[in-house]
Amino acid sequence: MNPAERARWIGREDDMPLTMQCELAGVPRSTVYRRLEAATRMEFPCEEEDRLRALIDEEYTHRPFYGSRRMAVFLRGRGHRVNRKRVQRLMREMGLAGMAPGPTTSKAHPRHKVYPYLLRGVEVARPNQVWSTDLTYIRLARGFAYLVAIIDWYSRRVLAWRVSNSMDASFCVDCLEDALRHHGRPEVFNSDQGSQFTSDAFTGVLKREGVAISMDGRGRALDNIFVERLWRNVKYEDVYLKGYANMAELTVGLAQYFAFYNAGRPHQALRYETPDHVYRAGVGGGALIVDRFDGADQERGEDGSTGQRRAAAGVEMDTA
């Protein structure tokens, strides 16, 4: 009988110490320890990855400019043995990418049409002038989900939202149809270049309704700053505090939070009125992202900063 077969006799559950079991079986202890460690990793991979996802989610919400390199450093600082490849995989599964301009920011499906950004320097002066959407990752006690929402730029009102356990386009289309059904149609609809929003199923609905389609430029993550701020509020004011266990709890909890967000939460940017009030009255809201450079997103200006940082400097209104 070879050493590999004798090593299978040895187990942690035996009353005899591992060292003595190895000696009696004539098997090196290092071989047994490696086998037992591998078995443990196979038994609890989901729990470990869920912990990593939770840490990535919270740090990304706080510092959305972190890419996979900085996130790997952050996780190692928390005592986790991870390399950049693993962090890249997890962030890709979560739909996250650092905000810094780069070739993979808001990567669309290669066969989907990407539309130009139409809102640079445009003053949003009335409800239903501009709607916007985005996806975010939501951590659960075991597993995760994705949340999509549609927001009115003028009033910051959440018009529709959906949760899903996958990032396919169908639940995004369902969310869009719900918003159109209950709130009419906007003049312009803005999104990032994610494959869900560049898909024919999603853009086809907007074309059917005669809505102008706008998409964030590369390296211009803050073109959609109002939805980004919504995600920060949702997570810090609800998701992180309650720690939802499953999709059912999450759905009920988000329904309560968005009802509060729209009807009960005063917004500084709305002169401490609620989004519901501003949306109905058509007074007290507004938005303007000023473009302070001459056009090319990736060109550097006099201060040496890239398009994204200068776009951030051009946000004239508080988004809270």
Image (cartoon, rainbow, N blue to C red):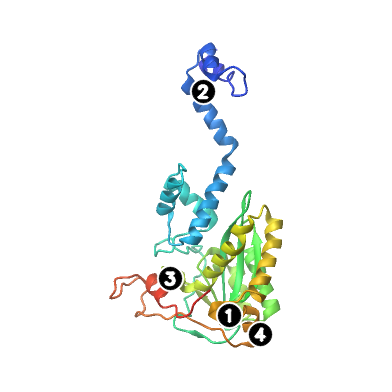
Q: Amino acid at mark 2?
A: Val
- SS class, disc 1: loop
Select label 4 or label 3 by which is in front: 4
- Tell me which numbered mark, 4 or 1, is placed earlier along the sequence: 1
Distance between the Cα atoms at labels 4 and 2?
69 Å
Q: Is residue 45 above or below residue 233?
A: above
Q: Amino acid at mark 4?
A: Arg
> Which dot marks residue 242?
none
- Tell me which numbered mark, 4 or 3, is placed earlier along the sequence: 3
Q: Amino acid at mark 3?
A: Arg
For residue 291, side relative to residue 287 (left or right): left
Residue count near mark 2 (Cα–Cα under 10 Å), binned few <14, some 14–19, many ≥20: many
Give the x, y percent position of residue 58. 52, 56
Question: Label 3, on which residue?
Answer: 220
Question: Label 1, on which residue?
Answer: 272
Question: Label 4, on which residue?
Answer: 280
Q: Is residue 147 above or below residue 140?
A: below
Give the x, y percent position of residue 139. 59, 55
Distance between the Cα atoms at labels 2 and 3?
53 Å
Question: Label 2, on which residue?
Answer: 32
Count of numbered circles on the image: 4
Asked whether 249 or 189 is in front, the reply is 249
Q: Is residue 52 above or below residue 307?
A: above
The residue positioned 49% from the left and 70% from the top of the image is 114
The residue positioned 64% from the left and 87% from the top of the image is 281
